[in-house]
Amino acid sequence: MLKPGETADSEEIREFCRGKIAHFKIPRYVKVTTEFPMTVTGKIQKFRMREMAIEELGLEVASQIETA
């Protein structure tokens, strides 16, 4: 989420990360949003964000892979 009046695109975010964090931690996908899915108590629903990203990016097959 960007502050009011600020602009950025996904490539700018990745470029900012280069040299600051390990290359394998640089995000593959970046989405700028205006609001987050929230619970009644005001917490961000990370599981809903994950589900929305899987739908938008068409990663249904990859999301079924079992990891540790």
Image (tube, rainbow, N blue to C red):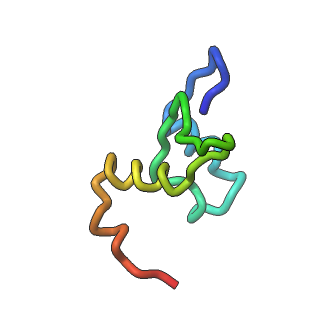
User: In the picture, residue 7 is in which quadrant?
Assistant: top right
Taking depth in this image into account, of 15 and 62 the one nearest to the observer is: 62
The vertical placement of 24 against 42, above or below, is below
50 left or right, relative to 56 = right
Q: Residue furthest top?
A: 5
Taking depth in this image into account, of 27 and 41 the one nearest to the observer is: 41
55 left or right, relative to 13 = left
Residue at 67% x, 40% y: name it: 42
Q: Residue furthest right?
A: 20
Residue at 68% x, 43% y: name it: 41
Residue at 62% x, 42% y: name it: 40
Q: Residue furthest bottom?
A: 68
The vertical placement of 54 against 3, above or below, is below
The vertical placement of 44 against 66, above or below, is above
Image quarter (top left, top right, bottom left or bottom right) of the N terminus: top right
Taking depth in this image into account, of 52 and 67 the one nearest to the observer is: 52
Q: Position of residue 46 (x, y in %)?
A: 56, 53
58 left or right, relative to 52 = left
Q: Position of residue 65 (x, y in %)?
A: 36, 77
Q: Position of residue 22 (x, y in %)?
A: 65, 62
- Give the number of marks: 0
Residue at 69% x, 57% y: name it: 21
Q: Residue furthest front?
A: 40
Q: Position of residue 23 (x, y in %)?
A: 59, 61
